[in-house]
């Protein structure tokens, strides 16, 4: 089944997951998702800094609407730096992938960027991450460059994507 075929409709995803600001109590679950998603995960301190110290950061988590408990199923770390939205990190728990949750998180960040007056959204992705690259292209991002040997463990190039947030 294709990524698009497995994805739930936009309203279905929104009805299943609520997006909320990341809290300190969310960090252990976020770290678990981070380690399940990346070969070179961010350290715990980086997430704590995003919540406590970084005035440019708007960390967000996705939790199931049906649960009374706060169960983190995915997260996104967007920065707003002047007129640019920088998507720093996004991941979805393996059990919640293929439902459109990653798209939902990115769409929410794009809306935040538009509301904040950003003119462009930027992100980097591993050259080998075909699923994420396909998602970003389907959302209107275009390749804007390459950062050579940007990632480690394993060493790999990053593809830089950008998307205009201003109406044509």
Image (spheres, helix red, strand yellow):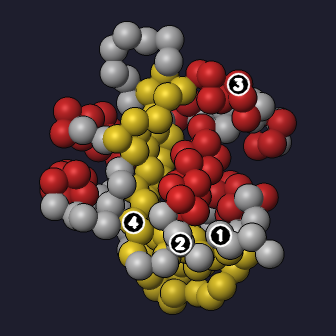
Residue 153 x, y percent position in the rendering: 38, 68
Q: Tell me if label 1 and label 2 are in contact, CB under 8 Å.
A: yes
The residue depicted at 50 percent of the width and 41 percent of the height is 92
Residue at disc 1, secondary structure: loop
Q: CA distance from mark 1 to mark 2?
A: 7 Å
Q: CA distance from mark 1 to mark 3?
A: 25 Å
Instruction: Please rate how many residues cluster around mark 2, counting C-alpha atoms within 10 Å: few if below 14, some from 14 to 19, many from 20.
Output: many
Name the N-terminal-most of marks 1 and 2: 2
Q: Which mark is residue 79?
A: 4
Residue 107 x, y percent position in the rendering: 62, 50
The residue depicted at 61 percent of the width and 42 percent of the height is 104
| Residue with the mark numbered 3 | 12
Q: Is residue 69 above or below residue 17?
A: above
| Residue with the mark numbered 2 | 118
Q: Which mark is residue 165?
A: 1
Q: Is residue 99 above or below residue 38?
A: above
Horizontal side of residue 66 vs 145, given as left or right: left
The residue depicted at 70 percent of the width and 79 percent of the height is 143
Instruction: Please rate how many residues cluster around mark 4, counting C-alpha atoms within 10 Å: few if below 14, some from 14 to 19, many from 20.
Output: many
Q: CA distance from mark 4 to mark 2?
A: 11 Å
Q: Of circles 4 and 2, which is in front?
A: 2
* Image quadrant assignment for residue 160: bottom right
């Amino acid at each position: 089944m294709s990524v698009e075929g497995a994805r739930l409709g936009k309203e279905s995803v929104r009805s299943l997951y609520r997006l909320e600001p990341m809290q300190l109590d969310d960090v252990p679950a976020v770290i678990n998702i981070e380690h399940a998603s990346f070969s070179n995960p961010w350290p715990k301190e980086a997430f704590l800094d995003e919540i406590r110290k970084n005035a440019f950061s708007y960390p967000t988590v996705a939790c199931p609407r049906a649960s009374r408990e706060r169960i983190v199923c995915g997260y996104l770390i967007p920065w707003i730096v002047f007129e640019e939205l920088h998507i720093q990190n996004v991941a979805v728990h393996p059990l919640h992938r293929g439902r459109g949750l990653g798209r939902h998180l990115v769409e929410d960040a794009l809306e935040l960027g538009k509301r904040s007056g950003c003119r462009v959204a930027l992100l980097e992705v591993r050259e080998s991450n075909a699923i994420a690259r396909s998602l970003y292209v389907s959302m209107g991002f275009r390749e804007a460059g390459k950062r050579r040997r940007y990632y480690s463990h394993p060493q790999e190039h990053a593809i830089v994507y950008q998307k205009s947030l201003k109406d044509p």
